[in-house]
Amino acid sequence: GAGVSQSPSNKVTEKGKDVELRCDPISGHTALYWYRQSLGQGLEFLIYFQGNSAPDKSGLPSDRFSAERTGGSVSTLTIQRTQQEDSAVYLCASSLNRNTGELFFGEGSRLTVL
Amino acid sequence: GENVEQHPSTLSVQEGDSAVIKCTYSDSASNYFPWYKQELGKGPQLIIDIRSNVGEKKDQRIAVTLNKTAKHFSLHITETQPEDSAVYFCAASSGAGSYQLTFGKGTKLSVIP
């Protein structure tokens, strides 16, 4: 596709359920990032993938959060046993490589935990 | 780690006036400073960036200035238009590019026609 694609665009779930959020980066981009955007807050780094290297997971807020990137392309962010404080917009971005200046963001997945 | 402070959090200007958003950073090793614009319901989009070997950069109505000594950088928008209304984020990185970017909390700019 022409840009970064994320799905679902909106997800409402009950506390305690697991959710999966999907990201399709721009073809050929080797770097992929997940960020969390809470109301009135900036962009909080979660995890970074670069090619086949081990991901940088230093931003994941708890062990309920995990992510994988299969075949160096599509990525899935999984949140287990969701809590109300997990409610936020989850943004995925890709860049040509880790040294490229521009991040291309998707439109985000808005997660609401009731 | 890096800490980026952004001010103001909200800004209203009349159409045609200038808008200035300021950011400070804490890590003197930071050398890459992008600005992103986020329209409602969209993901952020890069509008301009500057590297530490440059003090100012312009692109039409948008300019960014960097003061490395004081560790602050600013976004200047001249001749504002209603379509400039959005949330603007500054960021800083000590890497060569987008890796390890730290974002500010954003400025909601409203341009009043």
Image (cartoon, coloured by chain):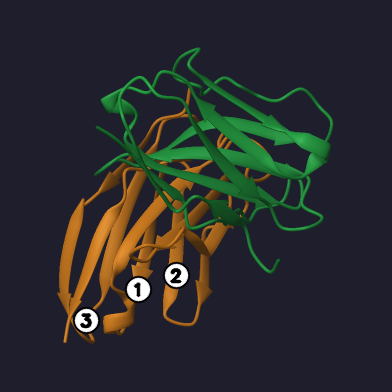
Q: Are marks 1 and 2 in contact (CB under 8 Å)?
A: no
At label 1, which amino acid type do we have?
A: Ile
Q: Is residue B87 left or right of residue A56?
A: left
Q: CA distance from mark 1 to mark 2?
A: 7 Å
Chain B palette colour: orange
Q: Is residue A52 above or below residue B97?
A: above
Q: Earlier in the sequence, mark 3 or mark 2?
A: 3
* Residue displayed at 77% across by 52% down: A29
Q: Chain of mark 1?
A: B
Chain A, colour shown? green
Residue A45, horizontal then vertical, whole percent: 50, 33
SS at badge 1: strand
Which quadrant of the rendered structure holds the N terminus of chain A? bottom right
Q: CA distance from mark 1 to mark 3?
A: 9 Å
Residue that carries the numbered disc 3 in the rendered image: B17
- Disc 2 marks which amino acid? Ala
Q: Residue at x 63, y 56 (%)?
A: A102
In the picture shown, does residue A10 fall above or below B101?
A: below
Screen quadrant of the C terminus of chain A = top left
Residue A2, placed above or below residue A71: below
Q: Which residue is mark 2?
A: B63
Whether callout 3 and callout 2 share a subunit is answered yes
Answer left or right for B28 relative to B73. right
- At x 59%, y 49%, the residue is A93
Q: Quadrant of residue B29?
A: top right
Residue B6 position in % (x across, y down): 30, 45
- Label 3 marks a residue whose chain is B
Dot 3 lies on which element? Answer: loop
Distance of mark 3 from mark 2, alpha carbons? 15 Å
Disc 1 marks which residue?
B77
